[in-house]
Image: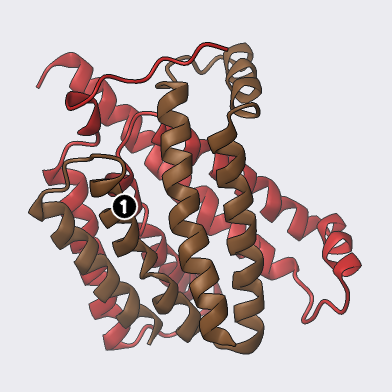
Amino acid sequence: MSSSHARLRVKTAIFAALVVVTNVSGNFFLKRGMPADLPSPLAYIGVLFRPWVALGVSLLIVWLLSRMALLSWADLSYVVPVTAIGYVLVALTGRLFLNERISPTRWAGIVLIMAGVSLVSIATKPQTWRTKSPPVEVHQ
Amino acid sequence: MRWLFIAIIVSADTVGEVMETLGMRRHGEIRDFRPGAIGRALALMARNRLVIGAVGAMAISFFAYLALLAVSDLSFAVPVTAVTCVLETVAAKYFLKEHVNWLRWAGASLVICGVVLVSL
């Protein structure tokens, strides 16, 4: 493995972790701050000023930007399954912070997701499209 | 009604993420993470039509998801919308010309089965 491949792997791992952590924590804080119902479109704007909702939205903005950065070099067919580890984190944070019980079926699901994520992340390269067609230069 | 929301979510998500990937590829690999360089990259991205389209599609998908959650349970909404995982892999192969080998297909399928079990 050349040094540029190793560098790409490390960079991809850091950004994939950032994408997952900001998504899971952002949604967690968003749910924590959301009222039970929003009667009018105006109420959707009003909730943005609640502290937990504002924190959740800020984390989701970081999520969006870090995923865009990740997709500037990594394959979509790599990013989508790898960041699915977030589903596992959601289930585990539910157990840790909210004392939810994880049923055997859920554990089976967690194992399947972990297997899928490791298959894609360990056994395939983050970037395959560049080898086929050169990157398009943009002149702005 | 809920199937309409699901159709909107799944198609907006898939179209949005394909546009996002194309837009960011056109932008080029982000290598410089100093604040000034990030600012310049953001300014370029804000003028990138594919990125703007992608953010619009994701906003549509987000509000359709909120609407779906209002009429159905999370345990229904999460696995059904995980279908996008497979659609995006198909789109990555045919639109984005990625090499989707059997390991990636297997990985994406395992993830979908797992998501369904987790939300049961």
Q: Quadrant of the C terminus of chain B?
A: bottom left
**Which quadrant of the view contains residue A47?**
bottom right
| Colour red, chain | A
A39 lies above or below B16: below
Question: Image point 30% across, 40% down: which residue?
Answer: B96
Q: Amino acid at mark 1?
A: Ala
> Looking at this view, is B31 or B68 the one in front?
B68
**Which quadrant of the view contains residue B29?**
top left
x%, y% of residue B84? Answer: 38, 64
Q: Secondary structure at mark 1?
A: helix
* Residue bearing mark 1: B91
A63 lies above or below A87: above
Question: Image point 28% across, 86% down: which residue?
Answer: A105
Question: Image point 45% across, 49% down: which residue?
Answer: B17
| Colour brown, chain | B
Circle 1 chain:
B
Q: Quadrant of the N terminus of chain B?
A: bottom right
> Looking at this view, is B14 or A54 the one in front?
B14
> Looking at this view, is A108 or A42 the one in front?
A42
**Which quadrant of the view contains residue A50?**
bottom right
